[in-house]
Amino acid sequence: MVLHVGTPKSGTTYLQRVLWDNQGALKAQGFRCAGHRPNDMFLAAVELRESHGFWGYDPEDLAGRWSAVCRDAQDHDGVTIMSHEVLGGATVSQVNRAYADLDGLDVHLVLTARDLARQVTSEWQERVKNGSARTFAKFERRLVRQLERGNFENGFWRNQDPVGVLSRWARDLPPDHVHVVVAPQSSADPSLLWRRFAEALDLDADGIDPVAPRRAANSSLGVAQIQVLRRVNQALAGRIKHPEYARVVKSQFAERVLAAQSSSRPQCPPELVERLRVLAEERNETIRSRGYVVHGDLAELVPRPPEGPYRSPDEVGRGAERAAYADAIAALLVQRASQGRVIRADAPRPADEGRLHRLGRLVDDLRRRRS
């Protein structure tokens, strides 16, 4: 079986959607995804990681989810693919439990990794998309303090340090059962990541279409759109909890409305890029010395200096931010109109009137915070 444990923001959502959109082709090669639908693996990972509180689930509703997907893998004659990036940050005790339920299976561990400079800005953005209102500056300060102290067991590093994740998950696996898939640079052919991943799985990539998953894969935002979302999170003040937040704010507002806009992408500060470059070269040497199977070129994990003058992701011009607000509200209104739910001024409907009132209060909150 194949156990793919992250890292987050290394193309995992894209890969998972390619797998689920090609179940027939996978079956023809003797492969299957764990669970009956994509969300099964997420819920199993949340239960294993004991992170139900953050994601808004009752632990009793998740009880047995991890064991269930493991039993499916045990019962399957072919190769089961268990993939979710939430697994990457598992503690040693959680990893022990994971392998206890996989006992008897020939496990191949897969880690997808991307250069740390891109991971820094991507993880900050992902946290904002999951409800955080923290500025990039605050996120960076904590990350740098941990880096200076050699603390790679918490925060960003727990999920993104490839050697740390591999040290917990590789355990007693032989080196030829541990695969590091290098996410290519952003200018590369998007299907290159898929081909490298398929190689790690010993899967014929040519029989599977990696180009057009049914849904966009976790769309990225520009700096103006991230700023809008941060301020929306401030105004919401926790009034929408997960999993409703993920459905309404992240999926509908951030990844559909805001992602349709464009502005410059956040960049990692040059000074931090240099620190990450040194760390990446050290991590690459450790991966080589351990004899893990590498798919791609480890040199692609070494961050490159940002092109052009650097500007903090927190420094968004007022004009760009206002335009993003206006475009977002316009898109929401167009969406309402296309659904046939426009409120006539002379005949308001109580339910819709309440929704508009709540939207108005949110806009007022945002205006007060801007002033």
Image (tube, rainbow, N blue to C red):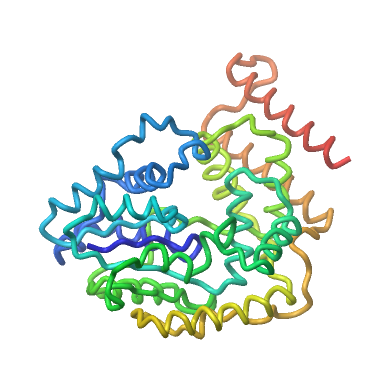
In this view of the protein, which residue sits in the foreground, 167 or 315? 167
Q: Position of residue 146 (x, y in %)?
A: 66, 63
The quadrant of the image that shows the N terminus is bottom left
Q: Position of residue 222 (x, y in %)?
A: 66, 60
The image quarter in which residue 302 lies? bottom right
The structure residue drawn at horizontal position 34% and vertical position 45%, both measured from the top left corner, is 44
Q: Which residue is most to the right? A: 371
In this view of the protein, which residue sits in the foreground, 139 or 365? 139
Labels in figure, total: 0
The structure residue drawn at horizontal position 78% and vertical position 69%, both measured from the top left corner, is 311
The structure residue drawn at horizontal position 80% and vertical position 60%, both measured from the top left corner, is 315
Would residue 227 be found to the left or right of residue 157 on screen? right
The image quarter in which residue 308 lies? bottom right
Would residue 141 be found to the left or right of residue 177 on screen? right
Q: Is residue 62 above or below residue 326?
A: above
Q: Is residue 28 above or below residue 99?
A: below
Q: Position of residue 29 (x, y in %)?
A: 15, 67
Q: Is residue 25 above or below residue 253?
A: below
Q: Is residue 196 above or below residue 98?
A: below
Q: Position of residue 78 (x, y in %)?
A: 13, 61
The image quarter in which residue 337 lies? top right
Q: Which residue is most to the left? A: 77
In this view of the protein, which residue sits in the foreground, 67 or 304? 67
The structure residue drawn at horizontal position 78% and vertical position 33%, both measured from the top left corner, is 365
The quadrant of the image that shows the C terminus is top right
